[in-house]
Every structure is written in C-alpha cells, then in structure tokens.
Amino acid sequence: MATPVSVLRLPKGPDPNSRGFDPNSPRFIALCRTSISTSAAEADTEELQREQRARSALRERFLRCLLAMTNKKVQFHMHEKVDVEATFGASDIDVLNFQVSDLHTPIGVQKEALIRCQDVISFTFDM
C-alpha cells in the first residue's frame, strides 16, 4: 500500500483581480508574446487579427480540455522521464499550476498537490 506524503499548503492563491489580459502589462508581454512585433502592428493588422483568432481558438480548445479532465485520472509526463498519475482537480486562472489529488509519484502518494505547469511536458487522460 502506498504511503501518503504530508501536504504542503500555500499561503495565498492566485489574485482574482489581475487576469493579465492588458496587452501593455509587463506580465502579458512576458507570457503572451505575439509573433508579430508591436511596431509592425499597424502595417500588419490583418495578420495580427488572424493570429489572435488562432490563439483564441487554441486557448478555447485547451480550456475545454481542462474542463473535460476534471475528476479524471490523468497521466503527467514530466522532465527527467518522470511519469506521475493523479486525479485532476483544477487549474489556476493563469494555468501556471494544476491542483491534483492522489498524486502517485516514484517516491510515494501525495493526497493533495500542486503541479507546476512548466514541469509538465504533456498529459493524457481517458475520456
């Protein structure tokens, strides 16, 4: 039987008032760069609109995928060839962390955990 590992509680969750959609904010610029430079935006407005539509469609697909994963067993494939399995709970608003339950790792089972998205290469789940 797998031994549960103690839970690490973070003191503060994501800030609900700062969603990062202001295209002039430093956070948006760091996390959501477009492939078209801002200086060329006036000259290539049609190309920028196409890119924004494509990004919007991809984001919607990803969010629907997260919604479909809720309360399902998910296999996370991480760096250093580490594979873990957990029951997916939620994602923070910026999709920087996944909240999971019953995380099965090579060193034991964590009842509740946060997985940093930057550590995940891919994930799979059964519909």
Image: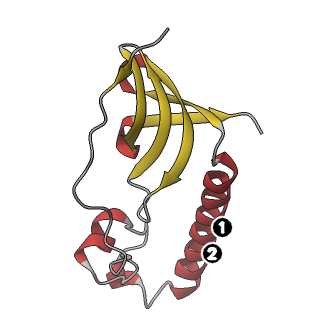
Dot 2 and dot 1 residues touching (CB under 8 Å): yes
Label 2: which secondary element: helix
Q: Residues within 10 Å of mark 2 (few under 14, many from 20)?
A: few
Residue 95: quarter of image: bottom left
Residue 78 percent across, percent down from the top left:
43, 28
Which residue appears at 62% of the width and 68% of the height? Answer: 54
Residue 5 percent across, percent down from the top left:
33, 24
Q: Please identify the residue farthest to the bottom as the structure is shown.
A: 42
Q: Nearer the viewer, residue 25 or 92?
A: 92
Which residue appears at 61% of the width and 56% of the height? Answer: 62
Label 1: which secondary element: helix
Q: Nearer the viewer, residue 86 or 5?
A: 5
Q: Is residue 42 left or right of residue 27?
A: right
Residue hosting label 2: 53
Which residue appears at 40% of the width and 15% of the height? Answer: 3
Residue 117 percent across, percent down from the top left:
40, 45
Amino acid type for the residue under numbered disc 2: Arg
Q: Nearer the viewer, residue 4 or 43?
A: 4
Q: Is residue 7 left or right of residue 125?
A: left
Compute the Cα span from label 2 to label 1: 6 Å
Residue 67: quarter of image: bottom right
Residue hosting label 1: 57
Residue 63 percent across, percent down from the top left:
61, 60
Amino acid type for the residue under numbered disc 1: Ala
